[in-house]
Amino acid sequence: MYPPPYDQVTNEIHAAPISTRLPSAPRPNPDAIGATWKYFPETSHYLSWSFLEYWQANGGLPVFGFPLTEEFSELNADTGVDYTVQLTERQRFEYHPENAPPYHVLLGRLGAELLVSQGRDWTTFPTADPSAPHYMPATGHAIDERFWDYWSGRGLDVGDPGVSFRESLALFGYPLSEPMMETNADNDTVLTQYFERAVFEWHPDNPPEWRVLLRRLGAEALSDRGW
């Protein structure tokens, strides 16, 4: 795979380019098939164990996208603790061994983090009328009708019948804005609504099942790192 750092025959040290050591560096296609891991040739990365189980159980490709890195350790700014994390196209998985399943895998608050990186304070955004459908008192915002079925129809599976409110909340979080027109990373100007863990976009020209798309926040986070 990679050259060894030290050659015992010649007593030479081999240095590999830093790009090959990054978590985002492509991994080779394995010869075998594993029961606890899956290789994605589309991005040349793996998902394994708890992250793979979470990915498969809670929406898979449409919700999370393909993995963009391998697992790596990262300091959590809120807790000051290092956690094992992995970036997918639309999310950041975090492994919290101190939590019992299913909360041992948590999602990054990438929607909230994106607003912070843009210098935008969601608490200053215009709020919704409390009588509006799907109003959330916790943040003062209402989930747009075009996004409601997507938000309420998916969630973290904790065993509730159907998809419960708390399951949807665990997956996407509360709305942090009202819907607004914004230009995304693909230079498309679309109706957009920010949530704690996602950014929803409305693409009316797509087939019905693809009119609601989630912004590729994991890919944007990866780009911000320069990886």
Image (cartoon, helix red, strand yellow):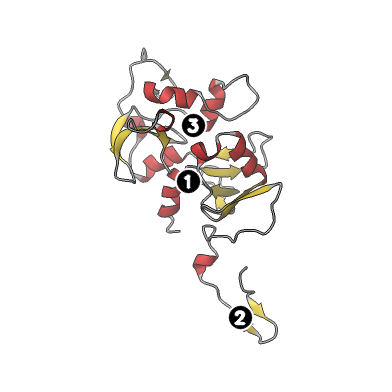
Residue linked to disc 3? 172
Q: Does label 2 or label 1 sit earlier along the sequence?
A: 2
Residue drawn at (51%, 57%), measured in percent from left and top? 24
Give the x, y percent position of residue 202: 35, 31
Task: State which mark lies toward you, 1 or 3.
Answer: 1
The residue closer to the viewer here, 161 or 195, is 161
Give the x, y percent position of residue 105: 61, 39
- At numbered mark 1, what does the secondary structure look like: helix, strand or loop? loop
Give the x, y percent position of residue 85: 57, 48
Pointer 2 with pointer 3, Cβ within 8 A: no
**Label of residue 89 in the image:** 1
| Label 3: how many Cα within 10 Å (few below 14, some 14–19, many 20+) | many
Q: Does label 1 or label 3 sit earlier along the sequence?
A: 1
Give the x, y percent position of residue 95: 62, 44
| Label 2: how many Cα within 10 Å (few below 14, some 14–19, many 20+) | few
**Label of residue 13 in the image:** 2
In 3D space, how far apart are the residues under numbered discs 2 and 1 (Cα atoms)? Answer: 36 Å
Tell me the quarter of the picture where residue 124 sits. top left
Q: Residue furthest top?
A: 131
Q: In this view, does 57 lie to the left or right of 18?
A: right
In 3D space, how far apart are the residues under numbered discs 1 and 3 (Cα atoms)? Answer: 15 Å
The residue closer to the viewer here, 66 or 110, is 66
**Amino acid type indicated by mark 3:** Phe
Task: State which mark lies toward you, 2 or 1.
Answer: 1
Q: How many marks?
A: 3
**Label of residue 145 in the image:** none
